[in-house]
Image (tube, rainbow, N blue to C red):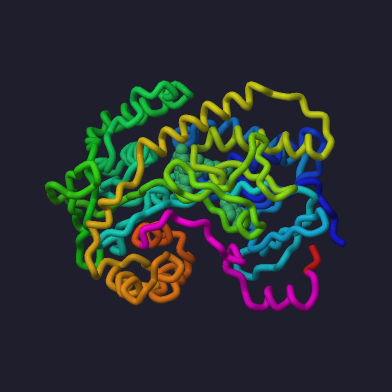
Amino acid sequence: MSHVHDLAVIGAGPAGVAGALSASLTGLDVVLIDAAPRPGGQYFRHLPEGFHARRPGALHHGLDRFTRQWEALGERATVLLGHRVWAVERADETITVRCLEGDREERPRTVTARRLLIATGAHDRPLPFPGWDLPGVLTAGGAQALLKGNLVVAGRRVVVAGTGPFLLPVAAGLADAGADVRGVYEANGRFGLARHPLLAAGKAGEALGYGVSLARHRVPYHGRQAVIEAHGEGALTHVTVAKLDAAWRPVATRTVECDTLAYGYGFVPQLELPVQLGCATRADADGSPVVDVDAGARTSVPGVYAAGESTGVGGAVLAEVEGRVAGRTVAADLGRRVRPLPVLSRRRERLSAFARALLEAYPVRPGWQGWLRRDTLICRCEEVPLSAVREAQELGATDARSIKLLARPGMGWCQGRMCGYAVACLAGENPLAPRRPIAQPVRLGDLAALNLSPLEG
Ligand SMILES: Cc1cc2nc3c(=O)[nH]c(=O)nc-3n(C[C@H](O)[C@H](O)[C@H](O)COP(=O)(O)OP(=O)(O)OC[C@H]3O[C@@H](n4cnc5c(N)ncnc54)[C@H](O)[C@@H]3O)c2cc1C
């Protein structure tokens, strides 16, 4: 049998790195696994080799701290970057993590550990609307990733739209990088949390910085407005912006010219691996399923822990705190002497309360469904229009799963990561946790090999 680590951590974002470091500082034998070639997750992105940003910390608050953690971890733990985890299994007190290592010619690799910490983060949550499949329309996270990870400005004349405070760093980053940002269109109220007592949880300064940056570049920030249609022959040329009522029904419209739309309606936690293991989930303040954990980051499955956005969307700072809590709990559960740190628990509670308040202040309201036409694509991968979803419902499909089986939304390459939320809303239900026996695309040969003989690490 291959070497059994004390702890395997999946995800090298702020939660996973903090969890792995906290556990390894107590002397545990830790292995950290991530699909990406560099650490940092969605927030701390790295430029390609040979590129240098003029002000590396400008787009990443806390980069120095993360870098110190990463360097300290490298001296203590095994790090496996470029390893996509497609399955996890638990048997006889041991957890088996099945990965594919490498880029094109992937090699199967198995990691075993006594404990598992899942810190797989979240992905963007777009909503469909007419024209969202045009070149030039991309998610806010995608625009941010291009900027932070490649120093690429997504377009020249950019509109930023959707809901939530994440729109602010995206717009400010694009404007600072030279884009003509035509406006930020927030579908909820502009100052949802301006007077919230917890804004002081370290976020006020950051929010002010984005505000100053937008003001310097004369970028208008509109509340209760949304992009409800994108137009262009082959590429984006303009968008229809609507003033919205409280339920997000359009009350007046106008046109804004642009070549790029960066938009997003929050994030969806990645739950494939915890669901594979049978971890219980709960509905977060916005109705999204998240892994249910106790105050020590333990899931409902013995030996399995979760931290960061997979347990609820709350930002990089909260993810790091949750990771630290998880790493320390694992160490304590494995018999290490761990000094209680009430200050850490209090910080976590404060930041979690703020995260809940954010989700409540920036909800997705049902009126967006009225922006759709019968020919609007709901699933871009399988090119499923709204009419096909409605036909499936007329045939008797009453939930997202039966709509998927009849009309194929969510059957394509992204496996419903982009359209799953919308299809659930159209079906009139809360989004459910994904039930996929395989978390990542995997070759038939690797599956076949798994059946014939156990993979060796
Ligand atoms: C596209 C995008 C851009 C964002 N940009 C910003 C921003 O600019 N500013 C901001 O404040 N917040 C941003 N956020 C939110 C921010 O990413 C989170 O608050 C924070 O990064 C959460 O940390 P985490 O450790 O929970 O997860 P993440 O940072 O998301 O890290 C999760 C890690 O898990 C790895 N992973 C996931 N699944 C697997 C698997 N099956 N196998 C192996 N590895 C896996 C991923 O590669 C990733 O490195 C962004 C989110 C997204 C989705």
Q: Quadrant of the N terminus?
A: bottom right
In percent of width and height, residue 48 lies at: 53, 50
Is residue 442 one of those drawn in magenta?
A: yes
Residue visible at 47% across and 24% down in the picture: 202
The residue depicted at 40 percent of the width and 49 percent of the height is 152
Residue 256 visible in the current orientation: yes
Residue at 38% over, 62% down: 423
Rendering coords of residue 335 (x, y %): 84, 36
Q: How many numbered discs, if any?
A: 0
Residue 124 vertical position relative to residue 332 in the rendered view, above or below: below
Q: For residue 65, which quarter of the picture?
A: top right
Toward the viewer: 274 or 161? Answer: 274
Of the pair 433 and 233, the residue shown nearer to us: 433
Whether residue 328 is in magenta: the answer is no
Inspect this view and state whether residue 46 appears: no
Q: For this view, does 61 lie left or right of residue 437?
A: left
- Quadrant containing the C terminus in the rendered view: bottom right
- Looking at the image, residue 158 sits to the left or right of residue 3; the answer is left
Using the image, determine if residue 244 lies above or below residue 112: above
Residue 349 x/y as whole percent: 56, 28
Kindly report the secondary structure that dominates the magenta region of the rendered protein.
loop
What are the residue bounds of the magenta stretch? 427-454
Q: Residue at x 36, y 25 (%)?
A: 208
Depth check: 383 or 62 in front? 383
Whether residue 291 sits left or right of residue 216 in the image: it is right
- Is 300 positioned to the left or the right of 350 in the image? right
Q: Position of residue 14 (x, y in %)?
A: 59, 39
